[in-house]
């Protein structure tokens, strides 16, 4: 005898259990939105002096950022840890929040590594990557998509 024949109401109870989970949030959305660290959007601009990278990183402070150059790679990373603790007579709630990101870019040979500067203001980290003096200037090339 199998369990379904012996207990015919078991299938109905499983159907009710499934109905319970239908109103829960989509686990894929919850995983991607809440559990994965967010990587800030980056705008890369070419200007007459070199390049500018703008990172959208609200909620951080200057001390949270690390900028490292190793060979021809520049890595921009940040870590922030915070704790929110609320106490009441009947319960205690404690929440930790830890967020981090890391982005790496290959620097062109024409960038003067000794003159790279960074500034964090109004939730945006701006990096200026100036071109070396005397470096040949390149003109942008547009490539069509077929």
Image: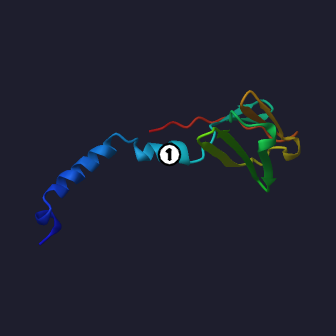
Residue at x-position 33% and y-position 46%:
21
- Tell me the residue that label 1 is attached to: 32
What is the crowding at mark 1: few (fewer than 14 residues within 10 Å), some, or many (at least 20)? few
Q: Quadrant of residue 9?
A: bottom left
Residue at x-position 50% and y-position 45%:
32
Residue 109 x %, y %? 78, 49
Residue 74 x %, y %? 75, 49
Say whether residue 44 is visible. yes
Residue at x-position 65% and y-position 39%:
86
Q: Residue furthest top?
A: 122
Relative side of 25 to 96, left or right:
left
Q: Quadrant of residue 20?
A: top left
Q: Secondary structure at mark 1?
A: helix
Q: Nearer the viewer, residue 8 or 33?
A: 8
Q: Quadrant of residue 46?
A: top right
The image quadrant where one finds the N terminus is bottom left
Relative side of 25 to 105, left or right:
left
Q: Exactly how many numbered labels are in the figure?
A: 1
Residue at x-position 88% and y-position 41%:
115
**Figure colour scheme:** rainbow
Q: Nearer the viewer, residue 97 or 135?
A: 97
Residue 37 x %, y %? 60, 47
């Amino acid at each position: 005898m199998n369990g379904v024949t012996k207990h015919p109401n078991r299938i109905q109870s499983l159907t009710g259990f499934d109905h319970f989970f239908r109103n829960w949030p989509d686990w894929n959305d919850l995983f991607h939105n809440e559990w994965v660290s967010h990587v800030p959007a980056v705008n890369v601009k070419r200007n007459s002096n070199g390049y500018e990278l703008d990172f959208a990183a609200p909620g951080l402070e200057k001390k949270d950022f690390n900028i490292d150059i190793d060979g021809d790679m520049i890595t921009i990373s940040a870590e922030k840890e915070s704790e929110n603790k609320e106490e009441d007579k009947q319960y205690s709630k404690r929440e930790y929040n830890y967020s981090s990101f890391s982005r790496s870019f290959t620097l062109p040979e024409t960038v003067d590594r000794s003159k790279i500067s960074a500034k964090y203001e109004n939730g945006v980290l701006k990096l200026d990557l100036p071109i070396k003096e005397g470096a040949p200037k390149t003109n942008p090339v547009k490539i069509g998509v077929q």
